[in-house]
Every structure is written in structure tokens, then in C-alpha cells.
Image (cartoon, rainbow, N blue to C red):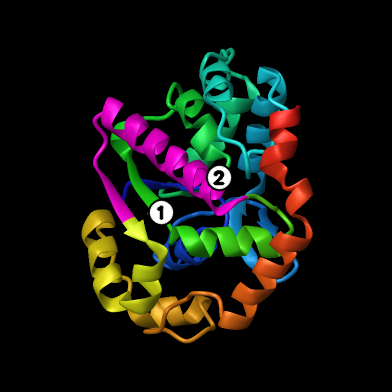
Amino acid sequence: MKKNVIILTSGLSGSSVLTGLIARAGYWTGYRTFRKDEYETHENQELIDLNLRLFREAGYTGNYLLEFSPSAIERIAALDPGPDDSVYRSFLDRCNEHIPWIWKDPRLWLTIRFWKKLLDLDQCSFILLTRGLVQSWISSTLRRQITTYRYSRNYEESIRLSIEDFLQENRRPYLHLHYEELIQRPAAAIERLNAHLGTALTVDDLKAIYHKPLYKSPRNSIAKHVKAMLIYLKNYSERLDIVTERE
């Protein structure tokens, strides 16, 4: 029997593409999935709602897309999952009616230490997904999330290290996959993915959910890079890393 899959990543990392690809191998994404205007995220809506509930219960009001908060990780990890009929246990029971399932929510880097209390980790396969640091900064800036590149780099690397610490602490084998690798060298990346998950996915499966050119860098165009720089310069005095420091 295939193990369930948990993708751990930050936001804007290409995780929707990866999750859509894996789902084609028969992994359950949920009764309802979250959809943005331009694409299907393949995120289990109930998982999103419960992660947001964990934020509230831990008193975390920061912006998880821009702020790395060790104290929030600790507060969420310390929360009690509650009795057998708690919303968290009941959700996991529903997921386990549809094994193998896949979880993908960028909030998981904050909440996975809580979910660990409920999960059978031996029945889960983990994937750490990262993206080029410059491209992460460009994508964030185009969405008007204005920070310095240095701040963005430190944020992304802090999340990666936190995820790696979690996996190593719990002695979990995992696949570290780079989004650029999946798009530029899809055959090799999918071969690694199949070896990790025991699936038989192909490049055709990727083409079915990724409608841009493969075998080319997924990097933003020069025009988008220039646009990001202009947005950054125009909003430099109000960039969010300074707002965070003021607060």
C-alpha cells in the first residue's frame, strides 16, 4: 500500500504543480480543495481551515508568508490535540478513509510539529520542496509583498532549516526536490519522485497539469524581473520587513 504524502515548503514554491502531479497517481486531496483565480492549488480546504484554527489557538497573528517565527512554531507544537472526537482527530480519521492522501499547505511548516502528535509517521512519505531564492523574491514582490532580497533569502532558508530539523529529529527519510529541477529536467525529477513514493508517474502526467513549456527555466522573464525591481523601489520605504520590525 502506498504511504500518504506530506509536502513541506514555503509559499510560492511551485507546490501546486507538484501536488497536482502526485495526485494523478491516485492520492486523495480532500473533499474540497482551495482554488485561486488562476489555478487549482490542490490544497485540502479542511486542512487549511484547521491550520488557521491552530494559529488562532496559539495566538499567532503574524504573516506566515513573510515572517519566520520560532515562538509561533513552539506555541503551536505545544497545543493539545484534544479528545478522540476533537476536530483535529476527526479530520485525520476522514483522511484515513481515503488512503493514500496528500497534504499540501504552506502553513504546514508552522503546524507540522502539532500534527506529528496525531499522524502515524511511518505511514507518511515526506517531500521538502524548495525554489530558487531570486525567483521566490521576484514572485513575492510581484504580489506586493515588499521585502529586501536579503530578508526574503533569510526567511526561505529559515523555513528550509526548520523543516529539515523536524525531519531529522523524527528520523524521517525525505526527498528534497527543487521546483526548477522538476520543470527543467522533468524525466530525472519524476524518476526520483517515483523511487521515493513507489509511483509510476511520467512526464505526460506533468504535462497534464503544467501548461507552460518544460525543459526550460521556470524563471520569471526579464520583463517581470524589471517590474519587480520597479515595484520594490517604489515601495521601498514601506517594505514589510521594516513594518514587521516596527511592530
Examine the rendering and report whether any part of residue 134 can be seen. Answer: yes
Q: Residue at x 29, y 69 (%)?
A: 189
In the rendered image, the vertical position of residue 182 relative to residue 195, given as above or below: below
Question: Which mark is nearer the camera, 2 or 1?
Answer: 2
Q: Residue at x 33, y 71 (%)?
A: 201
Q: Does dot 1 land on a helix, a strand or a loop?
A: strand
Residues tagged 2 and 1 counted as in contact (Cβ below 8 A): no
In the rendered image, the vertical position of residue 96 relative to residue 12, given as above or below: above
Neighbour tally class for label 2: few under 14, some 14-19, many 20 plus, Cα within 10 Å: some
**Image quarter in which the C terminus is found:** top right
Quarter of the image holding residue 68? top right
Callout 2 amino acid: Tyr
Q: Which mark is residue 118?
A: none
Magenta span of residues: 148-176
- 181 or 105, which is in the foreground? 181
According to the picture, the residue beneath numbered tag 2 turns out to be 151
**In-image side of 214 versus 192 (left or right):** right
**In-image side of 91 versus 62 (left or right):** left
How far apart are labels 2 and 1 at the CA level? 20 Å
Q: Residue at x 32, y 38 (%)?
A: 123
Q: Position of residue 93 (x, y in %)?
A: 52, 33
**In-image side of 146 versus 204 (left or right):** right
According to the picture, the residue beneath numbered tag 1 turns out to be 129
Callout 1 amino acid: Leu
Q: Does dot 2 land on a helix, a strand or a loop?
A: helix
**In-image side of 220 versus 96 (left or right):** right
